[in-house]
Image (cartoon, rainbow, N blue to C red):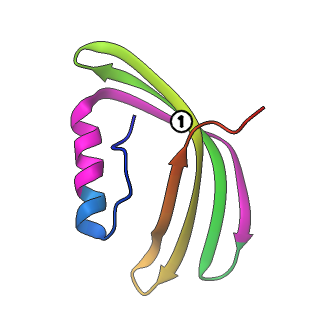
Amino acid sequence: MFAEGTFHGKAAVCAAIRQTFEWIRSERYQVQNLHWTARGADFACCVYDFSWNGLIDGEPASGAGRGSCALIRDARGWRLLQEHLGPPAAS
């Protein structure tokens, strides 16, 4: 359960994340099968499986999927450059 759509810019991404946190209470989020596809001194990319559970409108809810992200390191440290979350990988 994440705000559906494509978000451009920090403000839009932050708004989508805030909305998700408002929907899901007592969330537990887990990352499994983390695989680093590329690593360097100032960049890294990975793919992973994720699962979550929590309460939406007081009712139990859960979901799972596959994610990928790209990170960069600059003068401020490691930062998320891009992330994609989608349905689980096909078996």
Residue 46 pos. (x, y %): 65, 59
Residue lying at 28% horizontally and 51% vertically, measured from the top left: 16
The secondary element bearing badge 1 is classed as: strand
Residue farthest toward the right in the current orientation of the protein: 91
Main secondary structure found in the magenta portion? strand
Query: In the rendered image, which quarter contains the N terminus?
Result: top left
- Provide the residue span drawn in magenta: 15-38
Q: Quadrant of residue 28?
A: top left
Residue placed under numbered mark 1 in the picture? 30
Q: Nearer the viewer, residue 86 or 37?
A: 86
Q: Residue at x 31, y 20 (%)?
A: 55
Does the magenta portion include 31?
yes
The vertical placement of 73 against 71, above or below, is below
Q: Is residue 2 left or right of residue 32?
A: left
Residue type for callout 1: Gln
Position of residue 57 measured from the top left corner of the image (x, y, whole percent): 22, 18
| In this rendering, position of residue 30 left or right of residue 90 | left
Q: In this rendered view, identify the residue nearer to me: 13 or 76.
A: 13
Does the magenta portion include 17?
Answer: yes
Q: Nearer the viewer, residue 87 or 79?
A: 87
Q: Position of residue 91 (x, y in %)?
A: 78, 31
Q: Position of residue 27 (x, y in %)?
A: 36, 29
- Quadrant in the picture for residue 60: top left
Residue 57 left/right relative to 88:
left
